[in-house]
Image (cartoon, coloured by chain):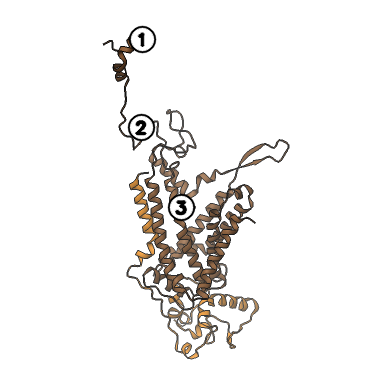
Chain colours: A brown, B orange
Amino acid sequence: MNQKYMLPLAGVVLLFLLAYAGVEGAGLQWFFGIVIPYLAVIAFIWGFVNRVMGWADSAVPFRIPTTCGQEKSLPWIKQNRIDNPDTAWGVFIRMVLEIFLFRSLFRNTKAAFHRDENNRLSYSWEIFLWLGALAFHYAFLVTAVRHLRFFMEPVPWCLKALEYMDGIVQLGLPNIFMSGLVLLAAALFLLARRIFDAKVSYISLAADYFPLFLIIGIAVTGIAMRYFTKVDVVGVKEFTMGIVTFQPVIPAGVGPLFYAHLFMVSVLIVYFPMSKLMHMGGIFLSPTRNMANNTRAKRHVNPWNYAVDVHTYEQYEDHFRDKMIEAGLPVDKKE
Amino acid sequence: MSKNAIIAGLVVFVATALFPFWFNIGGSNAAPEIELSERAKAARYCVLEKYDMRAEHMSLLDEWRDSVVRDADRLYKGTNGKSFNMSLSTGEDSCLGCHTDKEKFCDRCHNFVSVAPYCWECHTTPEEVTR
């Protein structure tokens, strides 16, 4: 037990209960279904743009790419064009691999003491964080894209194809969507890592647990609605289409679980811009990744350099010539 | 990264994030209307209550399939005290026996929410048989 995760957990449970009780007990469908989601979208867009514009304003005067391979050098030395790029194209490839495959995380290592009389510290390759992160992000992406079926009428063939592939195991009715289960499993794995790995636990804060609990809550309510408690999907789509066409309706027969799901999603997107989840935008702006290592080939002038009043040697000598000659020091010009 | 590139990226992001809103400009929130056959209208009841039926029918059909195929049990006792023959498409006493028009009853909602049930990979509708 640890307050760093007990507080966020209690927070998420409270948020869930707030929406559930608000709808079931107080009949506040219009509040949790219409007011909050609109405000959440505004807060998300405003917050996201603000945060990124703040980053855009900050100075990046130097080339500071992390170099993970041979720099461009003499013609007979083979350069690592991706891990130490000197061209925009190399940087592009590096960024694509980073964004889509989390390449730097792939190199994750863990430090541990040998459990023998030497007690030697050694580093080993640790791939599970990378695997869990990849599963989590792609499952989340597929789940989010899948939800577009609630926001498009008619539903285009590409979404149907995605749903077909996602449900291709054809288990049960309604079909199991693999993405939802992988999302939940991966989020639970990432949570377990923070709780049970002592070294990770030590550096984990409430801000690390809160989004995990929130996403787990969203996944659990979503899965519950689809497979267990069931929800009137036609009513749900009526509702979502009402939101996006600005003609909001509260359909009959859609239960509080749906509003709890929606409320947690709203909280997630409001929380997004002010949290570590902004790595979504930040990954594009990592100066250690998105810059070419070409400092030896190209001169980069600090953009806020101003004209400095310099005092050259000639001026110095002009100033002190008499004294220098008097003291017997060598001078360039005798007169 | 240059500020212009960042702003261009932001514009793309905001446009993507707000996709559901601009895509549906001029759209409507109308859900499809299903048409009940005369017989269904006259009966005034189904296997479950209306909203339960809307939400649960796929699970019910899944259970029915197991019951019929594995246990050869075709009798379903509904919570409303009535008994039903467990069959999707065979005869008068089946789902499609009462809801005769698949296109106007099943497909309208399924298409609306992008559900492609695999019922029809094995079952045929009575109309298809007579055609």
The quadrant where residue A316 appears = top left
The quadrant of the image that shows the C terminus of chain A is top left
Which of marks 3 and 2 precedes in the sequence?
Answer: 3
Q: Which residue is mark 3?
A: A278
Answer left or right for B64 relative to B16. Answer: right
B60 shown above or below B84: above
Callout 1: SS: loop
Task: Please identify, in this view, whether the residue under mark 2 or under mark 3 is nearer the observer.
Answer: 3
Q: Nearer the viewer, residue A182 or A315?
A: A315
- Report which quarter residue B69 is drawn in: bottom right
Q: Where B85 sits versus B23, above or below?
A: below
Residues at marks 1 and 2, CA–CA distance in whole angstroms:
42 Å
Sequence-wise, the earlier of marks 3 and 1 is 3
Residue B33 quadrant? bottom left
In the rendered structure, the answer to whether residue A51 lies left or right of residue B97 reads left
Q: Name the residue that disc number 1 marks.
A: A327
Amino acid identity at mark 3: Met
Pointer 2 residue: A299
Residue A318: percent from left, percent from top: 28, 17
Question: How far across and down, in percent of the image, does residue B81 sit?
Answer: 60, 88
Q: Amino acid under label 1? A: Ala
Q: Chain of mark 2?
A: A
